[in-house]
Image: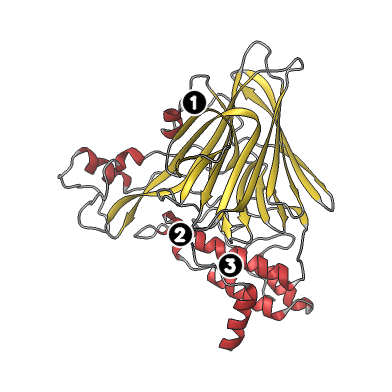
Amino acid sequence: MALASVRSLAGAKAKEPASVPLAVAPVADPPRRSLSQRLADAQADGRSDPDYLDVARQELYRSQCNCPYWHGAFGGLYLPHLRNAIYRHLIAAENALDDAAGRTGPRVAIEVGDFNLDARQEVRIENDHLVALVRPATGGHIYELDVREALTNLLATLERRPEAYHQMIAAAAQNPGQDYHGPASVQNKVILKQEGLDRLLVYDKAPRKALVDHFYSANVTLDDLRACRDVERGDFVTGAYLSKFSRGSKRVALTMERPGWVDGHSVHVRKSIALDAGSRALDIHYELEGIPQDMALHFAVEINLAALAGHAPDRYYTDDTGTRLGMLDTPLDLPQTDGVSLSDEWLGLSASLSWSCPAGLWCFPIETVSQSEGGFEGVYQSSAVIPHWRVVADASGCWEVRIRWTIDRAPATAAAAPAHATLAETIAGFQAAQ
């Protein structure tokens, strides 16, 4: 399957146990092996509300529409609205299972398991508003962040990778008007729906997720990052982090740490992610140790945000004072700021990031090139948000920063997305159809 993350939908298909009467590919979900297994367990238990279980099953089936799992002749995986629809149904299924079991009100939990079937342990942190999935073995990234009420995964991102048809685009851009004699495309001729598509043929070296830890060269620029030039000076981007967690009735926290190298110097990075019951915010704490006293390090934290349209006036950046900075496909290079917000009034969502130490800020769109019925076109996938600091050690060779990531409701426009049916409305419709 090609769709990344979504619990285990990007992993290998596991066979459904023979005792489970569901002809579906399982979707891993703690504490049981999969959403389908969790649904079967709830049915067997007999204490869960059967109406909510019917809704969960219906949403799980809907999430298995095949279009977003493959490239397809015309977009498929590359179309964000198709990927987002899959996540919407998966999140709705999980919400229904929680309601079936009577799990309502403020709560918080943390679980460990192989949720994406990569033979490594991931960590799931959740409360009544958010679900975060973290990969300590791959850079300590947050690779999924579900907003329960909005049925939206803010990390439904897509890495840019080579595709066979990219050579056709490059050839057509270099020789406009000439026929391409390479592998045949679905169309009889190569049609570029916009200029400059060849400049979008840039390929990512690391996952476009959140809490991707970088140490850059001192003179790196926004253009270097947009072009994916080799400016990395450390080995933390996809390195494995050791992890441990703490669990309380009102707060859970995951702590990850890794000794690594930056320009030949040994540096230790520790980062923690904490979530409170009833909270709409992740509290993130970075601590750097072993910083050389005779040099400054250029440290950056990359956070990619998806499920938000790029070029639309009701999708925009604002600074920490509330001033609009441009639409979400606008490149930003701010010398100093205390935070930034990304708002999508159509979805009614706002993601705000603030940090305890003033930072420089780079933001830029992640865009791919894919096929459509009308030809080849650029597609906005996500926005990269990268606060960065010139780190100078204190007397003990240490430095720290705290980041708060808040997900809130944004003011909705008149053309806002249609409201999702409540579970009660879905149940009523399901019963009426029987």
Q: Which residue is mark 3?
A: 25
Q: Name the amino acid type tagged 1.
A: Val
Say if residue 262 shows up in the picture: yes
29 left or right, relative to 77: right
Mark 2, Cα crowd under 10 Å, few <14 / some 14-19 / many 20+, is some
Say if residue 22 shows up in the picture: no
Residue 161, compared with residue 47, is above or below; it is above
- Residue 85 in the image: x percent, y percent? 50, 63
Q: Which residue is mark 2?
A: 81
Query: As drawn, which residue projects farthest toward the right?
Result: 249
Residue at image location 50% in from the left, 55% down from the top: 345
Q: Which residue is mark 1?
A: 231
For marks 1 and 3, give the one nearer the viewer. Answer: 1
Secondary structure beneath disc 1? loop
Residue 160, compared with residue 113, is above or below; it is above
Residue at image location 65% in from the left, 69% down from the top: 36
Residue 289, compared with residue 356, is above or below; it is above
Q: Name the N-terminal-most of marks 1 and 2.
A: 2
Residue 194, compared with residue 87, is above or below; it is above
How far apart in space, not on screen, are marks 1 and 3 (Cα)? 41 Å
Q: Name the N-terminal-most of marks 1 and 3.
A: 3
Secondary structure beneath disc 2? helix
For marks 1 and 2, give the one nearer the viewer. Answer: 2
Circle number at residue 275: none
- Residue 320 in the image: x percent, y percent? 58, 37
Residue 358 falls in image quadrant: top right
Q: Nearer the viewer, residue 344 or 168?
A: 344
For marks 3 and 2, give the one nearer the viewer. Answer: 2
Q: Nearer the viewer, residue 408 or 190?
A: 408
